[in-house]
Image (spheres, rainbow, N blue to C red):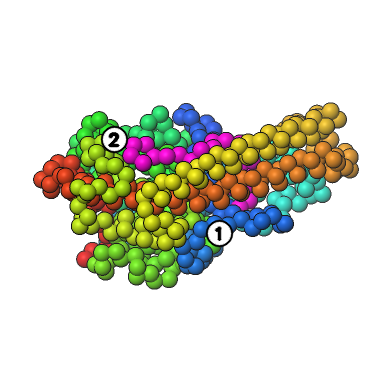
Amino acid sequence: MNGPESNAPGAQATRAWVRGALLFALGGLAGGGLSANLARPPHGTREVVFQAADEGDEAASTISVDGAADAAEGAQPGGASMGVSTQPSEPERRALLQRPLRFLAVGGGADPVSTQVQLEQDVDLFARTLAALTPGPGATLFAGGSSVRAVQVLDGDDTPLATDAWADLRAALGDVLDPRAERAATYRLPAVPVHGEAEAARVLELIATQIAEPGERLELFIACHGDQGDTPADNYVALWGDSAFDARELAGALAPPTAQRGARVLLTACFGGGFAELAFEGADSSAGPAASDVCGLFATSAEHESSGCDPNPDRQAQEGYALHVLHALRGEGRDGAPLSALDLDGDGIVGMLEAHTQARVASRSIDLPSTTSERYLRSLAAALDVPSGTPASSDEAYATPEEDAVIRALGALLGIASEGDAESTRAMLETQLGEAAARVEALGAEEDEAQRALVLRLAERWPELLDPFRADFERTLRRDAPALRLLLRSAPAASYQRARRATDRALLAEENLRLRWVQVMRLARAFETRRLARALAATRPLTDPARQHYEALLSCERAPLARR
């Protein structure tokens, strides 16, 4: 696995609206860029986190590390303790943002459609966790600010938003003509204290200003959507108003000429591992190690999507990197129960990298967590020249407690004892994923054809209904409602619904395979990281600059939030 990380084949094979509709119904939208208006190209897939089989189908299954992962903190945003907040006044906001901050939370999407409630919940959980564990003020920049009704919530109420006699018919036509997952959601104001909008330029400016303040390392949390660029350093996060910044732009904000302190970044976006380029000067791998005191931990790699943007506010129905990491920092599992096994070094405090390790082990999602230290270590792989398997020249006494924990837990869960076995299992699953993606593509084509046939039948008689903004749309709908209902119960309509169900079943099967592949990938990466770290320790003394930078990144990532 030296070099670029393996990608599961077929990840781009499915059509966005089919996957989007399925995911919205199940919960767990992936953290990809959802705004079509971004100047940078959006990726086109979403990922399923939890699976549910249709009645009569084989039950879909996922991997569970322990029963605690099935519980949750409550249905309210951020947990049961969170309710509608009293927003700070404008003078209070200005005064706070001019002070040195201990932490800064940034969250939300490019618009209300991409600002799912889980993003708000995670921002709230971060702020409450930091406030409990570390002294000093913190601020939150979220979506369009406190006065914008941007939070998308799927409340579970099946009652149509419109309740007239034609509401069900409108919904059925919309499902045929223009399927949109978000139609089932409502929107509200933020229920967390918000100190400003999360617009990219404003975020970067505030970060640079804060880094110029003396004090302890700034804890920076970013919960949003992300997309891929041409290179990992071009990967970017999508923020309010179709604004965005990439790894290079964040690197500049974190290392201004006036910098007086460092920062640690915790980022949940899709393709967020591209921000691991912060390990290098200016996020440029050809420029050598970064001189600034900056490190980062990310929900996923530079090449893969992440979970964590569910419109369903019920925490029991959610998965996601932040949910595990932030609870782990509090010394508990995602259900809130104490979990002493999180403290890997026995110092009585759960550090950030220990919490990150818990997400690698316990999260049942598509996430492939990564860090700046891993990225930097892999940049040295060619120079270390170590083959797969523990080389004879490695320093087996070099402590890698986080990788050891992942290998123990996932190795036992998956029945895999070696790096070679992990690699062969990965290859087998990738073959199966390719076959599953081909099935999804074939069934999707059949679904498209069935949809076109039904739309044509509709258009032949009621072309006015193809545009819901026409002045005669409502008149036509109401006048011909009985005939329209008959069409929607006709053989072409039944064929379309059967095709949709078949596609959904194939998507579920593909995603269940993907969940197992993710577990194997996490294990394989742990084996590789341990092998490379031992080789580095065996071949480079502590005085070596590359070794020093790696150890500095690890130290930054491991540091706890609580004062000793």
377 sits left or right of 147 in the view = left
Q: Residues within 10 Å of mark 2 (few under 14, many from 20)?
A: many
Please, which residue is most extreme toward the left here?
543
Q: What residue is shown with label 1?
A: 317
Distance from Cα at disc 2 to Cα at disc 1: 36 Å
Magenta residues? 1-26
Q: Which residue is pictured at 27% across the width and 33% down the height?
A: 285
Amino acid type of disc 1?
A: Ala
**Residue 514 falls within the magenta-colored stretch:** no
Q: Residues within 10 Å of mark 1 (few under 14, many from 20)?
A: some
Q: In this rendering, does residue 453 appear at all?
A: yes
Percent across and percent down for residue 260 are 18, 45
Does dot 2 land on a helix, a strand or a loop?
helix
Q: Which of the pair 104/515 is nearer the observer?
A: 515
Q: Which residue is pictured at 78% across the width and 32% down the height?
A: 453
Quarter of the figure with the C terminus? bottom left
Q: How many marks?
A: 2
Amino acid type of disc 2?
A: Ala
Q: Which residue is pictured at 77% across the width and 47% down the height?
A: 167
Q: Which residue is pictured at 38% across the width and 56% down the height?
A: 417
Q: What residue is shown with label 2?
A: 283
Residue 2: which quarter of the image? top left
**Residue 23 falls within the magenta-colored stretch:** yes
Q: Which of the pair 384/76 is nearer the observer?
A: 384
